[in-house]
């Protein structure tokens, strides 16, 4: 098995930064359980996230879950911030190590992502696009990065629209054990043409 391509050593340092406007700086860093879990716990217990994330559980359960992700060589969690304020949480995972690997021809370096944006009332128009495009730039900067996959719930209209608008290509609808998902892929070649 191959380790996750974008698995950084834990650091509180910014791993990626990009200006979105004269006043907005998007950054990506590793999730810090002690700093970020209270925010994530609040997000996953809000109505907009419950249906698609199903993580409305106790803080201790969430802490155990994210500790296991950060310790896993085949997965990692990141936080995207706008001007140092968290606006999104991202999980990245090696496709071959997850259920998704049963639905695609997996190549070395292929990575899947899950993206949880902060509550809509706290977001500005366009931030979801900035985050996902920033994630793509961060990911494809790694020379061993393979295809990037997203598998939002087929009922999550916002996530599906976001995937389409940021260059992912729809492949097919797939049954996963916990949802019916729309499968999207973004290859390095396609990313470079966007």
Image (cartoon, rainbow, N blue to C red):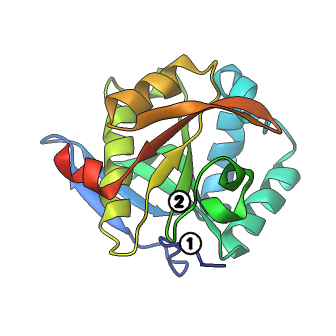
Which residue is painted at 50% across and 77% down in the image?
8
Q: Position of residue 107 (x, y in %)?
A: 52, 66
Horizontal side of residue 181 vs 130, given as left or right: right
Label 1 Cα crowd, 10 Å radius (few <14 / some 14-19 / many 20+)? many
Q: Residue at x 58, y 56 (%)?
A: 105
Residue 68 location, x and y as percent? 77, 67
Q: Quadrant of residue 92?
A: bottom right
Distance from Cα at disc 1 to Cα at disc 2:
7 Å
Which numbered marker is on residue 111? 2
Q: Earlier in the sequence, mark 1 or mark 2?
A: 1
Judged from this view, the residue extending furthest toward the front is 105
Between 130 and 11, the residue placed more toward the observer is: 130
Q: Residue 180's x, y, as percent?
A: 72, 28
1 and 2 marks in contact (CB < 8 Å): yes
Instruction: Tell me the residue that label 1 is attached to.
Output: 4
Where disc 2 sits, the SS reads strand
**From the viewer's perspective, is residue 153 above or below residue 37?**
above
């Amino acid at each position: 098995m191959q380790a996750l391509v974008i698995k950084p050593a834990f650091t509180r340092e910014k791993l990626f930064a990009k200006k979105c406007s004269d006043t907005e700086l998007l950054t990506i860093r590793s999730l810090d359980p002690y700093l970020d879990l209270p925010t994530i716990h609040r997000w996953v217990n809000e109505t907009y996230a419950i249906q698609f994330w199903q993580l409305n559980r106790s803080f201790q359960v969430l802490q155990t879950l994210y500790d296991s992700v950060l310790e896993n060589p085949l997965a990692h969690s990141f936080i995207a911030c706008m001007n140092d304020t968290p606006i999104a949480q991202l999980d990245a995972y090696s496709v071959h190590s997850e259920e998704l690997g049963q639905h695609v021809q997996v190549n070395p370096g292929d990575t899947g992502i899950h993206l949880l944006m902060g509550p809509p009332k706290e977001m500005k128009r366009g931030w979801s696009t900035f985050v996902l495009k920033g994630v793509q730039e961060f990911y494809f900067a790694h020379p061993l990065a393979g295809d990037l996959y997203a598998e939002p719930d087929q009922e999550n209209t916002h996530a599906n629209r976001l995937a389409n608008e940021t260059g992912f290509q729809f492949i097919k609808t797939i049954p996963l054990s916990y949802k019916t998902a729309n499968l999207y892929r973004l290859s390095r070649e396609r990313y470079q043409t966007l």
